[in-house]
Structure formats: structure tokens, C-alpha cells
Image (spheres, rainbow, N blue to C red):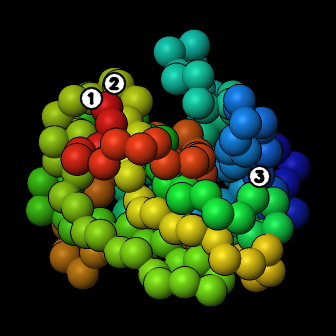
Amino acid sequence: MSDQRHQQTGPHWRGGHEAVIDEEGHAKVAHFSARDLDITWGNDTRFWQWVGLKEDKPSALKFHEGAELIQVNWVEVKGTLAAEKLPLSTRYEVLYLVKFKDDAFGWHSSHITFQVTPPHGQKSKRTLVLEHHRKDCNKWHEIHAGEFSLTSGTGEVAFSMYGDDSEWWKGGMILGGVLIKPKLAQEHSSDKS
């Protein structure tokens, strides 16, 4: 465990919201580690624990540490990015990089909402049941959280995954981080696996 965990107080992890910005071709891509996100109950080891990410991680995942969901009823992971860090006139997508372990549980009836709110635009929101990702365990998934465009370089883009109102406890998911990148020309018909 890092010293950062011990410096925080209370049960919730408060990330630094510091993205690593890479130039990939002519585009800028923002990479958030799990530690840079806000994770409800993330500072309580009964619910979340920091884990090393193995060599099988996708190239989009730039970090060596992730957050493993041990068990929670209410899932909430969120972050923000200053709009000034990305060029205008580009359509972006937000992707959560997750992997489900063999013994992941509780995802079959849990509705998880993904929301993206740009500073000067319309919020996008979608709700998913992640069971089909859980069934494809031990493999990294890029879960499409939403899209946005920037009309100004001021303000922040907020993104979150949260839910649900069910009484199902969930566990066995590893959060590698979040990726914000330019959306490719083709439509997003389904989540990438």
C-alpha cells in the first residue's frame, strides 16, 4: 500500500484527478490510473484493495496498479478532466478499463450507470448490466461510458460509473483505469472486449 492511502481520512478514496496525456498520432489521449479516480469505499480494505496489474494488461493501460473490488453494494467511481487539456472540435469517448475475476459475483442483476458530463454540453448517460463481461472473465474490457465534444477550453469534463439501487452485493472486478480518447469514425455498436 502506498503512503497516499494513509494520508487520506474517511472510508472513500479521493483521487488526484491527474491524467497522463499522451499524443498518439495527431490526437491527445488522457489516461487515468485507478488511484487518480474517486472511489466510494475505496479507502476501506474490506471493500476495495490496491493490486498490481500483470503483464496481460492491454497497451491502453499505462499503469502497474489497479483497484480490486472485493465487495460492495453501491459502486461509484468518478473523475474529472480539465477541458483545457484536450483540443476542441473533436468527439471523444470515455472508456472504463476493467477485468472480472473467475469468482466475480453479483453482476447478473446489477444495473450500472455510466455518465459523462462535458462543461458546456449535454450529458450522456447509459445503464448496463455487466454480466456478459463477467462471463468473459480474466480478460480486459473497454466499457464505453459515453461521448462528448468540447466547445470551449474552460471547465471540466466529469465522468462516472455508479449504481445500483438493488440489494445485490458485487465483487471480483479489477479497475485498471479510465481512458479518454478521440472517437473513431465508426459507430460504437457494442463495448470492446
- Type of residue at label 1? Cys
- Which numbered marker is on residue 137? 1
Residue at label 2? 138
- Type of residue at label 3? Ala
Which badge, 2 or 3, comes first in the chain's sequence?
A: 3
Residue at label 3? 19
Say which of 89 and 117 sits in front: 89
Q: Secondary structure at mark 1?
A: loop
Task: Residue at 58%, 30% (x, y): give it.
Answer: 60
Q: Residues within 10 Å of mark 2 (few under 14, many from 20)?
A: some
Say which of 67 and 142 sits in front: 142
Q: Farthest top residue?
A: 55
Circle 2 or circle 3, nearest the eye:
3
Can residue 44 be seen here? The reply is: no
Q: Position of residue 112 (x, y in %)?
A: 29, 66
Q: Quadrant of the C terminus?
A: top left
Q: Position of residue 115 (x, y in %)?
A: 43, 72
In this rendering, is residue 44 above or below 11? above
Task: Residue at 54%, 59% (x, y): give it.
Answer: 91
Which badge, 3 or 1, comes first in the chain's sequence?
A: 3
- The residues tagged by marks 3 and 1 sit, at their Cα atoms, a distance apart of 27 Å
In this rendering, is residue 92 above or below 162? above
